[in-house]
């Protein structure tokens, strides 16, 4: 009874190991923005970021993941799982949009980086329940509609 379980565990570890090696898994643990552009559906997002003002200051993870170690890698793991299943089963959303949970992370990171500015804004009549990127949508990824890619959303 133990031998089939042992063989199964060894086969599972071997399949996972080969999968991790073939996919170059370790690049997804870092902060290199070109990693986010490994999928062609991210071309317009990457291109927008590359030519926008935040390129000099922020990578994808600076805005899209928490900065605390454990939450960062939990978000990266969840996102990676979602991306793998979407590409495996062909359910790739068009256009790509951040999920509500990611919106909250992005907002927290906007406030963290721009703390002095936000403090001044929050002391004024600004509505606190709004996200920074509702008004500053083109800051991180540039203006929408400038890409030559046919699947880019030009309505928002």
Image (tube, rainbow, N blue to C red):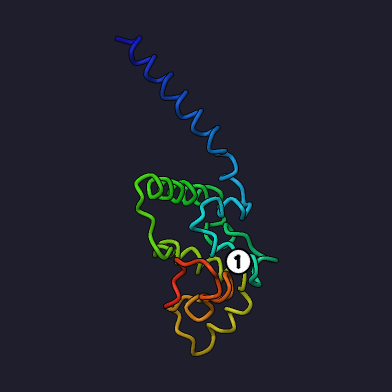
Instruction: Name the residue that disc number 1 marks.
Output: 49
Check the picture and name the quadrant holding the C terminus.
bottom left
**Residue shown at 56%/84% (left/top)?**
121
Residue 108: % across, % down: 51, 67
Q: Out of 119 and 35, give the one closest to the viewer.
A: 35
Q: Quadrant of residue 123?
A: bottom right
Image x and y of residue 97, in percent: 43, 65
Marks counted in the figure total 1
Residue at screen point 59% across, 83% down? 120
Please name the residue shown 41% across and 61% down the image.
Answer: 101
In the picture as drawn, the residue positioned furthest to the bottom comes out as: 125
- Pick the front one: 80 or 69: 80
117 vs 19: above or below: below
Residue 88 picture location, percent across and down? 38, 44
Residue reaching furthest to the left: 1
Q: Is 76 left or right of 86, judged from the image as shown?
A: right
- At a point 39% along the width and 55% down the height, the residue shown is 92
Q: Secondary structure at mark 1?
A: helix
Closest to the observer, 92 or 59: 92
Mark 1 is surrounded, within 10 Å at the Cα level, by few (under 14), some (14 to 19) or many (20 or more) other residues, namely many
Above or below residue 88? Residue 137 is below
**Furthest residue toward right:** 56
Residue 22 placement: quadrant: top right
Q: Position of residue 3 (x, y in %)?
A: 35, 9
Quadrant that contains the N terminus: top left
Residue closest to the eye, 110 or 87: 87
């Amino acid at each position: 009874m133990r031998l089939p379980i042992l063989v199964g565990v060894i086969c599972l570890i071997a399949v996972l190991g080969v999968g991790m090696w073939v996919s170059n898994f370790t690049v997804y643990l870092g902060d290199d923005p070109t990693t986010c552009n490994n999928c062609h559906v991210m071309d317009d997002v990457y291109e927008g970021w590359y030519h926008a003002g935040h390129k000099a200051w922020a990578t994808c993870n600076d805005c899209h993941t928490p900065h605390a170690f454990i939450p960062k890698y939990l978000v990266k793991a969840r996102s990676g799982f979602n991306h793998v299943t979407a590409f495996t089963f062909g359910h790739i959303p068009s256009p790509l949009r951040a999920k509500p949970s990611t919106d909250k992370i992005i907002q927290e990171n906007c406030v963290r980086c721009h703390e002095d500015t936000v403090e001044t804004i929050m002391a004024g009549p600004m509505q606190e329940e709004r996200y920074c990127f509702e008004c500053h949508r083109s800051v991180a990824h540039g203006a929408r509609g400038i890409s030559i890619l046919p699947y880019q959303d030009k309505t928002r």
